[in-house]
Amino acid sequence: MIDVSCFVGPWPFRTLSLAEPEVLRDRLVANGITRALVSPLGAVLQRSAQVANRELAARVAGDEVFAFVPVVNPAQGEALAELDAYPDSPAVRLLPGPHGYALDDPAVVEFVRAAGDRGRTVIVQVRMIDVRMAHPDVVHRELTADEVRGLAAACPKTSIVVAGARPAELAAIFAEPRSERLWCELSHCEQPDVVRNLINSVGVDRLLCGTHAPVHVVEALPAKLFSADLSAEHQEALARGNARAAGLLG
């Protein structure tokens, strides 16, 4: 199973038992995850993520489970250079809320198009944490469905993964007309029968596995999939096939 939305590192507002990559890797593997796309959690509170990217890329280089995904702030002038610094990464992650930019910023649209031209998938983080659980001094803006739809429409040749969205938001994001190069991961989808309901509303071919570890518990993902009572075909699509279609296997 491919986890397309995972982080490595400490979170400044509470102790995380899986902050260390070795501990996190063991927990992921124990829950059936053979590959995890990881970004530096420390980059969330840094407008420029270069240092956090370099540190994590070096730490997970050659790892059989972790695939490094840099965090880039496309509103900054060095964004493309930072993307090109990691040519083996299958994707790049954007954190618009924490980093304070809008998806319709011309610089952001240009960057997302350029990433697509380079064969990179763009992971767009709708939220990092429920604002009700956030530190009162650090509450990040959450993206709207219209913002995500607008970016997908402006960048039709770029594969985009929506991370951190809830089911109602995904229903709005995937309303017709929808982009054929748009996918979503499951980490913040926490309603009863949520996977089955999303298959019915969004389509199984649009869904990807994501844990949002170590902020969320790893075990939530396999529990959601188990409760959905998936067919073998749907299991393969969610576990690996859709990630391949989204360009996330490298």
Image (cartoon, grey):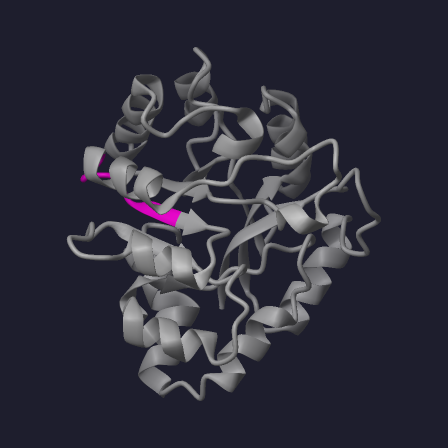
Q: Residue at x 18, y 39 (%)?
A: 156
Main secondary structure found in the magenta portion:
loop
Residue drawn at 62 percent across, 50 percent down: 130
Q: Please report the residue visible at 49 percent of the width from the left and 27 percent of the height from the top.
A: 72
Q: Position of residue 250 (x, y in %)?
A: 39, 48
Look at the picture and state if 62 lies above or below 246. Answer: above
Reply above or below: 100 against 57. above
Q: Is residue 120 visible?
A: no
Between 234 and 60, the one lying in front of the other is 234
Q: Position of residue 187 (x, y in %)?
A: 54, 60
Q: Residue furthest right?
A: 15
Question: Magenta residues, as a range?
Answer: 155-161
Q: Residue 158: within the magenta?
A: yes
> Is 52 on the left or on the right of 248, as rendered?
right
Q: Nearer the viewer, residue 76 or 144?
A: 144
The answer to which of 52 and 205 lies nearer the viewer is 205
Residue 138 in the image: x percent, y percent? 70, 33
Q: Per the image, is 132 magenta?
A: no
Counting from the top left corner in percent of width and height, residue 192 is at 52, 79
Image height of 222 relative to 44, above or below: below
